[in-house]
């Protein structure tokens, strides 16, 4: 196929490019917060609850810390939690789901009924429960969020497994003696990957929102550590005194969640997956 | 000749594919005389379907088209707007599509769909509607028309649905009926009946019919004239007898030589057409067929200038610089010796295999389908065994059970071990048998290179990495007639025929003892079919594999097999050597099958009589202890309902019919006078 003449390929703004452009600053914040933040995260630098000004672009919080610096430093926690939990949910859900769809029978029935049981709990309640029981460390948070997202991922991947199970190349491999794991890694996973990657981006986006909700409820990063969710919680308490307090963390959450979805949409177009992102997010990203 | 019913002049259509333009039709012109039956023949990509759609004004909006004119009985419809076309469609030109299931509305009764056409075009008034619907259904030879009118499409069998679809098309009393592959989805006996119906409808004189198909054999029994298309151009047209007897275009000649026929003697090899369709997005210079042409390839005239249409001797026209010229002798395939007939020891022995599929519910009777019922057969070492039958006969299930893709419910499968003894198993062991699937674009993982695809069975049986077997893969590629340099390509970069070669190389890679080919050429274009069948014959000459061919295509089975097993409704009804089966079939079903296979020779088709089968009710109790075929059998008697006939007979020619010995006389007695 020939490229359209006179249009430079690199300049075309695809959803992936837009998503990455939005996400890259936050990744930089997460990796090197000190380079971007004017102050330290715990440094009390001015009077509390100042509005935005030249000295403090987002204002100050309830004890006089610089809000911009807090938002920048919170990136590390929020990105880590969202990416890691999406990765864990993706891995577990994909392997279980594909195998469940491929093997079928009792294995499929048992695992899908288990999925139903998990899905019948409201997501947040489930995560709350897990964190309450196992503690508030970051890794517990990651696992809790991953665990509540795994069932829907598994169900989604199962559909892909069902679809691929009757494909000729899967049967051809079976006839040649290909075992379940061989078929999973050699045939199912590579062919399901385009669709699954889109699902992964939706998962990451959902994870940002769940992480923020948990922090908002006081179950995420613990003060004085900053997270976008617990900053919103503080903002809520002083909403009449400092109405602009929540703007910074709010924008950060929306932009990052949106960036993931944009990347997913770009991947979908790139791979020409038949299913649209909206339908994928409906089945995977229940928050 | 009467005034033409349909005239197409200089019709060109281009589809937008990305930024490129695909040439679907390039200046096609044809005339369909009134009351005439014409067939348009071509492979995929020839533009035959585009032609039908263009005439109907149903081309997608994304295509560019330019047309001299399309006119029906003198009325120009090429410039008609959508509104005007609505009164043309159905009324002047009607169309029957391949898939009646998709073309009929599933939530409305057959009767109401026919009545809709009557109402839209104001054919009859409200009072006459019901009678007209029934008349139309009777016209397409549906018994009990008033009952069928009240049914929904899913309640009809495939053949009945296609008849209903034709009735819908006839409702507007069209001047031209276009049928686009109307029988490709049907079984061979049903296909024959539908073609006979189209012939009858087309012979009444009032309506002209145009059959669009890829099947040259079918055309011989249907058409008065034939138009052959290649790469968007009409390369030859003429009376069917002349075209088949002395094809003027090398493409037509090659096509006719590439199809096996049950009417001809068994040849060693089929003709084939090398190469593939040219890139239709690239600008064309010279004759489109030149790169593949046995006559014109390399000739300056063919390379440089496009041939114009000239009159062909004996009638019709041809677009060729050298019409009627025969290819040089070296290019004519040499008849190879007939396939080996010595049959070795039993290699696979199936005894009483049974398989029932249960769907939905908790073991309710409703969802039970008996796919195999007490199937016994033997595959001998080194032979080529054909398993034939219509859809639902259980032939594919049998193959899947043998290969372990499906688990049998009962029966035993025995196979000869390397030591020479017989062992028993749930299926044949891994490595004993390999399968060539119907559709190579489905059976080859699109993400894997040829190297990985062909080496996969080797890696699975011997371990290691696929790159360690590179030399073997290159040798296998050469064996199946592909360039070893293609080793790093992916299936998407190959043509259908090349993909099937890869699938065969893959099946050969672990040197199995049995190769099971499930409709291995059914998804391929005609020109590729001959190549693949020849390849299989060559491989059989050189190697010691045993072949099991599963197919609905009796011509193909007759060409490549030594022995045939005929299946019906999950049972074996006849087993015989190929020659004996075709010379003296002992089961009425086999007789019907053979008489339904189209023969690509108009002279023979004109003289043939078909065995007409009854249409079986969708809920016929096939496994109630009687003969399952009795519902369709023309010679069934009371005994057939109560007694299941044994599979027995002299000298290995077995058949499961109570009247095996007298079947020929009995069937002559019941043959309807009108058939043939």
Image (cartoon, rainbow, N blue to C red):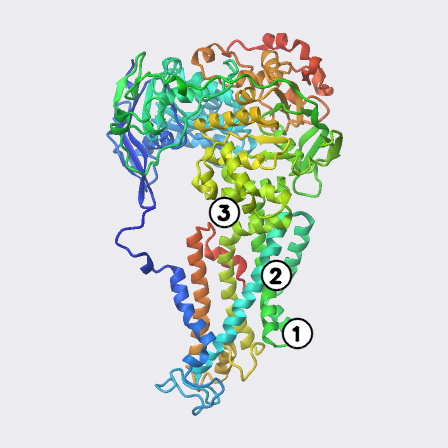
Q: Which mark is residue A134?
A: 1
Q: CA distance from mark 3 to mark 1?
A: 43 Å
- Label 3: which residue? B447
Dot 2: chain letter = A
Q: Position of residue B260 (x, y in %)?
A: 49, 20
Q: Quadrant of the N terminus of chain B?
A: top left
Cα separation, mark 1 vs mark 2, equals 20 Å
Q: Could you say where residue B301 lies in the image, as x and y percent from the top left? A: 25, 25
Mark 1 vs mark 2: which is more N-terminal?
A: 2
Can you say whether B463 is above or below B53 in the image? Answer: below
Q: Nearer the viewer, mark 1 or mark 2?
A: 1
Quarter residue B429 falls in = top right
Q: Is residue B204 visible?
A: yes
Q: Residues within 10 Å of mark 3 (few under 14, many from 20)?
A: some
The picture quadrant where one finds residue B525 is top left
Q: Which mark is residue A119?
A: 2
């Amino acid at each position: 196929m020939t490229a359209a003449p006179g249009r430079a390929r690199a300049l075309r703004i695809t959803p992936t490019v837009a998503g990455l452009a939005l996400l890259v600053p936050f990744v930089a914040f997460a990796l090197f917060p000190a380079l971007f933040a004017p102050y330290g995260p715990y440094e009390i630098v001015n009077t509390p609850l100042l509005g935005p000004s030249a000295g403090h672009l987002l204002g100050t919080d309830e004890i006089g810390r610089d809000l911009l610096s807090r938002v920048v430093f919170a990136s590390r926690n929020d990105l880590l939690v969202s990416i890691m939990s999406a990765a864990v949910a993706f891995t577990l859900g994909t392997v279980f789901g594909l195998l469940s769809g491929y093997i079928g029978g009792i294995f499929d029935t048992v695992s899908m009924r288990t999925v139903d049981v998990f899905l019948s709990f409201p997501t947040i309640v489930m995560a709350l429960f897990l964190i309450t029981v196992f503690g508030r460390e970051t890794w517990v948070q990651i696992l809790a969020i991953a665990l509540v997202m795994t069932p829907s991922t598994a169900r989604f991947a199962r559909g892909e497994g069902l679809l691929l199970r009757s494909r000729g190349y899967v049967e051809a491999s079976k006839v040649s003696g290909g075992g379940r794991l061989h078929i999973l890694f050699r045939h199912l996973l590579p062919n399901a990957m385009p669709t699954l990657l889109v699902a992964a981006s939706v998962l990451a986006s959902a994870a940002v929102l769940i992480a923020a909700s948990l922090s908002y409820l006081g179950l995420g990063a613990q003060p004085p550590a900053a997270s976008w969710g617990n900053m919103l919680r503080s903002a809520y308490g002083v909403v009449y005194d400092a109405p602009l307090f929540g703007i910074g963390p709010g924008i950060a959450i929306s932009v990052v969640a949106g960036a993931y979805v944009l990347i997913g949409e770009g991947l979908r177009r790139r791979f020409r997956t038949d299913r649209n992102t909206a339908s994928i997010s409906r089945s995977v990203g229940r928050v | 000749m009467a005034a033409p019913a349909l005239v197409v002049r200089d019709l060109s259509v281009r589809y937008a594919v990305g930024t490129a333009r695909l040439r679907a039709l390039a200046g096609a012109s044809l005339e369909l005389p009134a009351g005439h039956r014409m067939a348009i023949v071509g492979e995929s990509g020839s533009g035959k379907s585009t032609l039908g759609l263009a005439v109907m004004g149903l081309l997608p909006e994304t295509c560019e088209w330019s047309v001299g004119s399309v006119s029906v009985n003198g009325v120009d419809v090429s410039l008609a707007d959508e509104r005007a076309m609505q009164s043309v469609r159905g009324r002047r030109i009607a169309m029957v599509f391949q898939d009646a299931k998709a073309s009929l509305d599933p939530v409305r009764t057959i009767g109401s769909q026919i009545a809709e056409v009557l109402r839209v075009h104001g054919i009859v008034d409200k009072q006459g509607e019901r009678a007209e619907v029934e008349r139309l259904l009777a016209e397409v030879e549906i018994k009990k028309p008033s009952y069928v009118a009240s049914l929904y499409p899913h309640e009809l069998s495939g053949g009945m649905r296609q008849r209903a679809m034709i009735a819908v098309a006839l409702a507007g009393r069209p001047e031209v009926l276009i049928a686009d592959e109307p029988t490709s989805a049907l079984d061979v006996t049903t296909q024959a009946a539908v073609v006979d119906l189209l012939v009858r409808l087309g012979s009444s004189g009032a309506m002209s019919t145009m059959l669009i198909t890829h099947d040259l054999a079918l055309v011989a029994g249907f058409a008065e004239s034939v138009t052959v298309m290649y790469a968007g151009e009409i390369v030859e047209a003429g009376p069917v007898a002349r075209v088949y007897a002395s094809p003027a275009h090398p493409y037509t000649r090659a096509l006719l030589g590439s199809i096996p026929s049950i009417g001809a003697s068994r040849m060693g090899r089929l003709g084939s057409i090398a190469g593939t369709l040219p890139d239709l997005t690239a600008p064309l210079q010279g004759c489109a067929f030149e790169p593949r042409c046995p006559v014109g390839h390399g000739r300056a005239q063919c390379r440089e200038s496009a041939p114009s249409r000239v009159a062909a001797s004996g009638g019709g026209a041809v677009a060729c610089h050298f019409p009627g010229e025969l290819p040089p002798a070296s290019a004519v395939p040499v008849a190879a010796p007939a396939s080996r007939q010595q049959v070795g020891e039993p290699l696979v022995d199936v005894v009483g295999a049974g398989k029932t599929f249960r769907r939905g519910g908790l073991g309710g009777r409703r969802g039970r389908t008996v796919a195999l019922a007490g199937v016994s057969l033997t595959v001998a070492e080194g032979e080529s065994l054909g398993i034939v039958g219509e859809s639902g006969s259980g032939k594919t299930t049998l193959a899947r059970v043998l290969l372990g893709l499906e688990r049998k419910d009962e029966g035993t499968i025995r196979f000869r071990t390397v030591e020479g003894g017989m062992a028993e198993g749930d299926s044949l062991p891994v490595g004993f048998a390999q399968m060539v699937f119907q559709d190579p674009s489905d059976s080859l993982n699109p993400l894997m290179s040829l190297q990985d695809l062909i080496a996969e069975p080797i890696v699975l049986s011997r371990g290691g990495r696929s790159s360690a077997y590179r030399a073997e893969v290159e040798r296998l590629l050469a064996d199946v007639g592909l360039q070893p340099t293609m080793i790093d390509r992916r299936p998407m970069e190959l043509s259908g025929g090349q993909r099937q070669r890869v699938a065969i190389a893959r099946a050969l890679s672990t040197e199995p003892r049995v190769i099971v080919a499930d409709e291995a050429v059914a998804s391929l274009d005609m020109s590729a079919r001959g190549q693949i069948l020849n390849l299989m014959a060559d491989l059989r000459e050189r190697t010691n594999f045993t072949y099991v061919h599963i197919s609905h295509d009796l011509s193909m089975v007759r060409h490549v097999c030594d022995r045939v097993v005929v299946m019906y409704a999950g049972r074996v009804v006849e087993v015989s050597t190929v020659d004996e089966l075709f010379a003296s079939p002992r089961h009425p079903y086999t007789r019907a099958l053979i008489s339904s296979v189209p023969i690509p020779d108009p002279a023979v088709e004109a003289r043939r009589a078909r065995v007409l089968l009854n249409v079986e009710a969708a809920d016929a109790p096939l496994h109630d202890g009687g003969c399952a075929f009795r519902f369709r059998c023309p010679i069934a008697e009371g005994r057939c309902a109560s007694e299941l006939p044994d599979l027995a007979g002299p000298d290995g020619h077995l058949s499961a019919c109570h009247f095996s010995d007298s079947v020929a006389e009995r069937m002559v007695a019941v043959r309807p006078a009108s058939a043939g």
